[in-house]
């Protein structure tokens, strides 16, 4: 499919929190939520956008809970990476049911359920019009899925990293707790780092800064937010040079 000229970004890395798949309780995988997400991804593909997805695992496992009880961090992190594979499989299945082909690729090999992540193969999948879901983080403990998203975005030559959240951008303070919170339309990487606004962890932010990869933080649940972002419309907060 040829991307129309109206697109500002033709290949994107979409970073989702695991909570996007959860139901009312904020835990587990809700098949209905998976279908809603799949519909959003399908609309991007219908626009001609090549889509890679990195999804977290906060709906299934939070490593800090294990750490609070004395669990070894490497063990807690590996459990989280495996949980992202479960989320990726669920979302890929929902995407396929929209008629769009999808592939799950993992940094930790589990060939009976997903393909191992190989950069060249991932790019080829995108060129063929497949959605790719990049799971198991970087394959290493001590790195967040934010960092995995930044790394994979660079590897597949994505033009933008879209951090999809429940908030419509980056604020100077928590807008849910502070009615006077001010939203930023744009931030430089340095401003995001020094203000500690919590866009992404510092490792991911620095990686994007060093490689000049723009980040857009937006509300996934706001109607047409991602579609407008890939067209270059002012949505959410843009973090760039």
Image: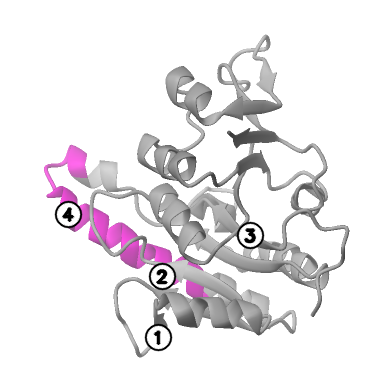
Q: Residues within 10 Å of mark 4 (few under 14, many from 20)?
A: some
Q: Position of residue 105 (x, y in %)?
A: 44, 76
* Foreground disc of the pair 1, 3: 3
- How far is disc 1 from disc 3 in space, using C-alphas? 25 Å
Front-lying residue, 28 or 205: 205
Q: Is residue 46 left or right of residue 69?
A: right
Label number found at residue 74: 4
Front-lying residue, 198 or 128: 128
Question: Which stretch did the figure color magenta?
Answer: 67-89
In the image, farthest residue toward the top: 180
- How far is disc 3 from disc 2 in space, using C-alphas? 20 Å
Q: Which of pointers 1 and 3 lies earlier in the amino acid sequence? A: 3
* Foreground disc of the pair 3, 2: 3
Relative to 125, does residue 172 appear above or below in the rendering?
above
Q: Is residue 173 left or right of residue 4?
A: left
Mark 1 — residue?
A: 113
- How far is disc 4 from disc 1 in space, using C-alphas? 23 Å
Relative to 201, does residue 100 appear above or below in the rendering?
below
Mark 3 — residue?
A: 12
Relative to 72, does residue 7 appear above or below in the rendering?
below
Secondary structure mostly seen in magenta is helix
Front-lying residue, 70 or 122: 122
Q: Can residue 234 be seen from the camera position used here?
A: yes
Q: Position of residue 198 (x, y in %)?
A: 47, 30
- How far is disc 4 from disc 2 in space, using C-alphas? 17 Å
Element type where label 2 sits in the image: helix
- How far is disc 1 from disc 2 in space, using C-alphas? 9 Å
Mark 2 — residue?
A: 85
């Amino acid at each position: 499919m040829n991307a129309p000229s109206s697109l500002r970004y033709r290949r994107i890395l979409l970073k989702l929190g695991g909570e996007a798949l959860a139901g009312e309780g904020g835990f587990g995988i809700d098949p209905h939520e998976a279908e809603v997400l799949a519909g959003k991804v399908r609309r991007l593909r219908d626009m001609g956008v090549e889509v890679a997805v990195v999804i977290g695992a906060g709906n299934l496992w939070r490593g800090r809970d294990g750490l609070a009880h004395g669990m070894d961090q490497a063990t807690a992190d590996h459990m989280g990476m495996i949980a992202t594979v479960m989320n990726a499989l669920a979302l890929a299945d929902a995407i396929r049911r929209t008629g769009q082909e999808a592939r799950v690729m993992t940094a930790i090999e589990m060939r009976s359920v997903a393909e191992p992540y190989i950069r060249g193969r991932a790019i080829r999948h995108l060129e063929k019009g497949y959605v790719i879901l990049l799971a198991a983080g970087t394959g290493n403990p001590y790195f967040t899925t934010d960092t995995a998203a930044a790394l994979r975005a660079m590897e597949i030559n994505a033009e933008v990293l879209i951090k999809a959240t429940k908030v419509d951008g980056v604020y100077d303070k928590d807008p849910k707790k502070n009615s006077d919170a001010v939203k930023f339309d744009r931030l430089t990487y340095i401003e995001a780092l020094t203000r500690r606004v919590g866009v992404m962890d510092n490792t991911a932010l620095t990686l994007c800064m060093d490689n000049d990869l723009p980040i857009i933080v937006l509300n996934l649940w706001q109607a047409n937010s991602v579609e407008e972002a890939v067209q270059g419309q002012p949505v959410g907060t843009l973090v760039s040079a």
